[in-house]
Image: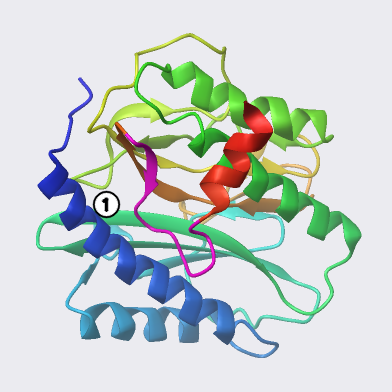
Amino acid sequence: MISRKSPAQIEKMARAGEIVAGCLEMMKEMCRPDVTTAELDRAAESFIREHGGIPTFKGYRGYPASICASPNEMVVHGIPGSYRIAGGDIVSLDVGVTLKGWVGDSALTVEVGDAGKLAERLMEVTEASLWRAIAKCRPGNHLGDVSHAVQEYVEANGFSVVRTLVGHGIGRKMHEEPQIPNYGTAGAGPELREGMVFAIEPMVNAGSHKVVVGDDHWAISTADDCLSAHFEHTVAVTAAGPRVLTARAGEENKSLEAASLVW
C-alpha cells in the first residue's frame, strides 16, 4: 500500500529535505583532490546534526556512516573511508536526513576536475532522466510513467539503467512502498495520487546494466568496471504538480523545464 501524506506532513518532509540539500551543496564544494571520503562523511554528519537532523543512513541495517560516497565505477552504497578523491574522478554522494520523524533523501554525482566527455555525458543524461521522471509525478499518471521516463531517455542516449536497484516511497521511514524501478512500461502500475511521496533515483551505467556487490557487502559497482552516475530527489505528488522536497539552489525551475521537454 502506498501511503499518502497530508500537506502539513509534506511540509515537515520539506524541512528535512532542506538539510539534505544543504549538506549535498557543502559536500559538492568539498570534493577536491586529496580529500578522503571519510572527511566528507565527518563534515556531513556535523552539518546534519548542527541543523537539528539525524543522519538517516547511520546504523540503518548496520550501515556505519552518515553518507554513501561512491567513486567512478561504484554505483551506490560506498562506505566512506580512506579513499582519496583524485582529479578526473566522478563521485556519487547520497544523503538521508531524519528531522522530527520525517525523512528526506537525495543524491548527486560530482565531477572532480576534468573527468572526460564520456563521464560528463553520463552525468548529464542521468540527471536529465531524473527530471523527466519528476515531471511525470502528477495525479492521474501511473508509476510506470515515472520508470519509463528514465529508461526511455537513458537508453536513447546509449547508456543503461541498473535493474537490480530501485527508488522507493519515503516518509516516516526511508524505505516505504512502492519500489520504483528505473525501467518500465508507460501507463502501467499504480495510479499516482495527491500526497504520495517518492525518492526517485536513476542509477545509470556507461556500459552494461549488470552490477556486483563488494566484499564489504555494501558497495555495489558495475560488473564491467565502466563508470556509473546516480542522481536522486525526494518528490511529492501534489495537485499543483510535482514538488521537489530536496531541491538545491538553482533547481527550482528544472521541473518545469523538464516538463516542457516531455509534454
Q: Residue furthest bottom?
A: 34
The residue tagged 1 is 61
Q: Element under label 1?
A: helix
> Residue at image x 64%, y 39%?
129
Image quadrant in which the C terminus is located: top right
- What residue span does the magenta drawing correspond to? 240-252
Residue 88 location, quadrant: bottom right
Viewer-nearest residue: 263 or 181: 263
Q: How is the image coloured?
A: rainbow
Q: Amino acid at mark 1?
A: Arg
Left-right relation of 257 to 62: right
- Residue 187 image position (x, y, % from top left): 50, 9
Residue 87 location, quadrant: bottom right
> Residue at image x 21%, y 44%?
171
Viewer-nearest residue: 247 or 126: 247
- Residue 240 image position (x, y, % from top left): 34, 36
Dominant secondary structure of the residues highlighted in magenta in the image? loop
> Residue at image x 43%, y 59%?
247
Residue 209 can be seen in this image: no
- Residue 98 image position (x, y, % from top left): 20, 61
> Residue at image x 49%, y 29%?
136
Viewer-nearest residue: 135 or 173: 135
Q: Give the total number of marks visible in the rendering.
A: 1
Number of residues whose C-alpha sits closer than 10 Å to that of mark 1, classed few (under 14), some (14–19) or many (20 or more): few
Viewer-nearest residue: 172 or 57: 172
The verdict on residue 247 being magenta is yes
